[in-house]
Image (cartoon, grey):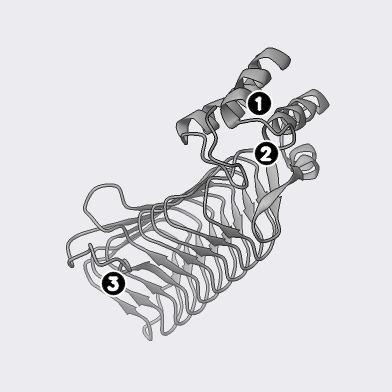
Amino acid sequence: MISPLSHVDPSAKIGQDVTIHPFAFVDADVEIGDGCEIMPYASVMRGTRMGKNNKVYQGAIVGADPQDFRWKGGESYCYIGDNNVIRESVIINRGISSQGGTRIGDGCFIFANSHVGHDSHIVGKCVLGNNVMIAGDVEIDECTILSSAVIVHEGCHVGKWALVKGGCRIGCNVPPFVIIAHNPASYYGINAVVMRKDGDFSESDIDDAAKAYRHIYQCSTSVFNALKRIEADIDDNAVRREVLDFIRRNNMRLVAVPMNYD
């Protein structure tokens, strides 16, 4: 159902069983997949490629122009996967170039008044609380929770199954499986409750994650030495590999860890 009181550009590609409510706006060069619902006063802007069964609430803007001086008005894109909920007044910016683009995976829940900046990548099954602010070129791995009013600065990477508590300001990388709290942001333990409830993790997996982060955050040694201790102390498994690979891929730059390579 497409309301005659909405604006849908004739060039937009609209799938089957899509509902577009009165006063919604769908721009040119937009693709909306089957089963989506665009609520009143929501806008889907040019360059947006939206998958199936997404719901965009009132006042949200998907595919807004990027807020970056490097963008000079050229063609750019915003990719939305399947089964996402985008609540009221959320703003998701497009990328700044024709390559890459902003990407939201599948099964994400983005609460009201949140902002996802240009070229950021929300991998999937993530929860972004009310008023979460994500700058450009940020990567949020799968099954991550950012509580209300979290700010993630440009270029940061948040690992899988992490929980960042409300109001934190993240200016560096958050490794997988941890809880981050307070300001300045600091390590607060393992995200064990969520891992037990929603993930396929054994008690042994959770213990190994806790042991790994004791070496990193609680042994007063460098990250370089902590990685060596993890390899010696914990048997090879998926959790250990995820921790080690994340830290090495991100040049050992972690929230609340001094830059010490000795």
Name which residue type carries label 3. Answer: Asp
Q: Nearer the viewer, residue 61 or 131?
A: 131
User: Relative to residue 170, is residue 40 depicted above or below?
Assistant: below
Q: Position of residue 116 (x, y in %)?
A: 45, 62
Instruction: For the C terminus, give its image quadrant.
Output: top right
User: Relative to residue 213, is residue 9 depicted above or below?
Assistant: below
Query: How many marks can you see?
Result: 3
Mark 3, other Cα within 10 Å: few <14 / some 14–19 / many ≥20: some
Name the residue: 50% across, 76% down: 89
Task: Tell me where residue 2 sits by quadrant.
Answer: bottom left
Label 3 or label 2, whichever comes before in sequence order: 3
Name which residue type carries label 1. Answer: Val
Instruction: For the N terminus, give its image quadrant.
Output: bottom left
Task: Tell me where residue 70 sits by quadrant.
Answer: bottom left
Return the residue at label 1: 239
As measured in the structure, the alpha-carbon distance from the residue carrying label 3 to the one carrying label 2 is 39 Å
As measured in the structure, the alpha-carbon distance from the residue carrying label 3 to the one carrying label 1 is 44 Å
Q: Nearer the viewer, residue 252 or 52?
A: 252
* Numbered disc in front, either 3 or 1: 1
Q: Is residue 235 visible?
A: no
Mark 2, other Cα within 10 Å: few <14 / some 14–19 / many ≥20: many
Q: Position of residue 127 (x, y in %)?
A: 62, 56
Q: Are marks 2 and 1 in contact (CB under 8 Å)?
A: yes
Q: Are marks 3 and 1 in contact (CB under 8 Å)?
A: no
Specify the label residue 177 is tagged with: 2
Return the residue at label 3: 27
